[in-house]
Image (cartoon, rainbow, N blue to C red):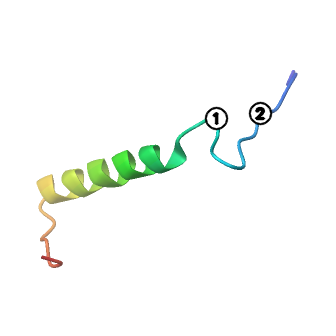
Amino acid sequence: MIKAILTDCDNTLIGFMRMKTLATNNAAKAMAKAGLKNHWQ
């Protein structure tokens, strides 16, 4: 049974932008390792 729901609408509890940056950087590294060509440099 759910007893509570916690929301963070203004990023005061969790640093969303830091997690987003880490996730996108790791995704880009994984794609490059898998052979994706870097066309934006």
Task: Give the left or right position of residue 41, taking residue 22 as reference.
Answer: left
Name the residue beneath numbered marker 1.
13
- The answer to whether residue 22 is above or below residue 13 is below
- The answer to whether residue 8 is above or below residue 28 is above
Disc 2: CA contacts within 10 A as few (<14), some (14-19) or many (>=20) = few
Q: Can you name the residue that lies furthest to the front here? A: 12
Disc 1 to disc 2, how far (Cα)? 10 Å
Task: Give the left or right position of residue 19, taking residue 33 as reference.
Answer: right
Quadrant placement of the C terminus: bottom left
Describe the element under mark 1 as helix, strand or loop.
loop
Quadrant placement of the N terminus: top right
The residue that appears at 12% across and 71% down in the rendered structure is 37
Query: What amino acid type is highlighted by mark number 1?
Result: Leu
> Looking at the image, which is closer to me, 8 or 27?
8
> Looking at the image, which is closer to me, 22 or 37?
22
Residue 39 location, x and y as percent? 14, 78
Name the residue beneath numbered marker 2.
6
Residue 4 location, x and y as percent? 85, 26
Residue 16 location, x and y as percent? 53, 46
Q: Which mark is residue 21?
A: none
Query: What amino acid type is highlighted by mark number 2?
Result: Leu
Disc 1: CA contacts within 10 A as few (<14), some (14-19) or many (>=20) = few
The residue that appears at 58% across and 37% down in the rendered structure is 14
Task: Give the left or right position of residue 27, taking residue 41 as reference.
Answer: right
Residue 22 location, x and y as percent? 35, 46
Tag 2 or tag 1, which sits nearer the N-term?
Answer: 2
Describe the element under mark 2 as helix, strand or loop.
loop
Task: Give the left or right position of residue 8, taking residue 18 as reference.
Answer: right
- The answer to whether residue 27 is above or below residue 38 is above
- Asked if the residues shown at circle 1 and circle 2 are in contact, with their CB atoms under 8 angstroms apart, the answer is yes
In this figure, what is the number of numbered marks?
Answer: 2
The residue that appears at 64% across and 40% down in the rendered structure is 12
